[in-house]
Amino acid sequence: MVLKKLNYIWRWFATAFSFLVFGLGGVLMPLLVVPILYLLPGNRLQREHRGQKFIHYSFRAFIWTLEKMGVLTYEVTGIEKLKDAKLVLANHPSLLDIVFLIACVPNANCVVKSKLLRNPFIRGPVKAAGYIINNDEAEAVITTAAQVFDEGRVVIVFPEGTRTTPSQKIQLKRGAANIAIRTGAEITPVLIDCSPTTLTKENRWYQIPDKRMHFTIQVKDKLDFGPSIVNLPPSKAARNLTNTLSEYFNGEVGVYE
């Protein structure tokens, strides 16, 4: 019992330390890293590529630190399928989902909410990597996503638009389907499970579970749109595809429940 309590205390302090480091990194990046990225020769695309690579390796180091400090364990399967991916769609059970995905994809771009630009810990990395800002202007997001695909980069989207509420059915918005329909990008689904459930919308970072988190990340085969969108107007095709994706994610994620 004493050992269990000591282990919990250690994981709490390790979690606190890890998030402190993460926050400091977000603050220092625009002060130290971003100026260097702009001073190095190259155009906008090259600067953004450097920023994405920096964040990729930083997130890999962050995950490594969390694992070595005993905060979490994880396993990733099918990661080779991300090498030629275009549009990556994933369910969103935890705050760390995006960290894992970017740690797996060196050239990842993401669709992020505009309000994150007001967060001092996140604003620097978002700007440095040239991530797609969602200002609720669907056309702008789709146009930028198409440009990112043409540049040979990956776009990561959480089609729920927010973290999943535990024990509730996954509800998808149409934004991801609209990107797929309008750009013709193939969809690579990723299934994420976190057990025990933690770092949800309902949890603060300091509300850690009694045992270590274990993440399972499965990269699945590309999805075939099938008859749900063939010869349909874009709006109806997006609605049908959203329904198809909802059924897919709810069916697959249900395996973990």
Image (cartoon, grey):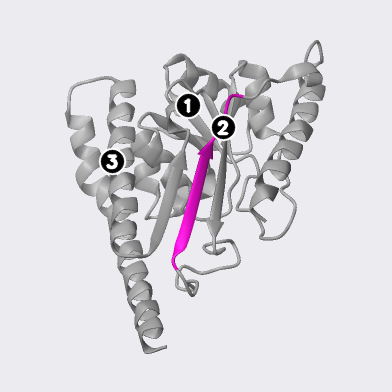
Q: Nearer the viewer, residue 109 or 247?
A: 247
The disc label shown at residue 57, or none: 3
Dot 1 or dot 3: first in sequence order is 3
Label 3: few (<14), some (14–19) or many (≥20) C-alpha neighbours in 10 Å: some
Callout 1: helix, strand or loop?
helix
Dot 2 corresponds to which residue?
Answer: 220
In whole angstroms, how far apart are the C-alphas of marks 2 and 1?
7 Å
Query: Disc 3 residue type?
Result: Tyr
The disc label shown at residue 81, or none: 1
Q: Position of residue 199 (x, y in %)?
A: 52, 62
Pair 1/3: label in front: 1
Q: Are marks 2 and 1 in contact (CB under 8 Å)?
A: yes
Q: Are marks 1 and 3 in contact (CB under 8 Å)?
A: no
Q: Which residues are magenta?
A: 212-222
Query: Disc 1 residue type?
Result: Lys
Q: Residue at x 64, y 39 (%)?
A: 159
Q: Position of residue 111 (x, y in %)?
A: 52, 36
Quadrant, the C terminus: bottom right
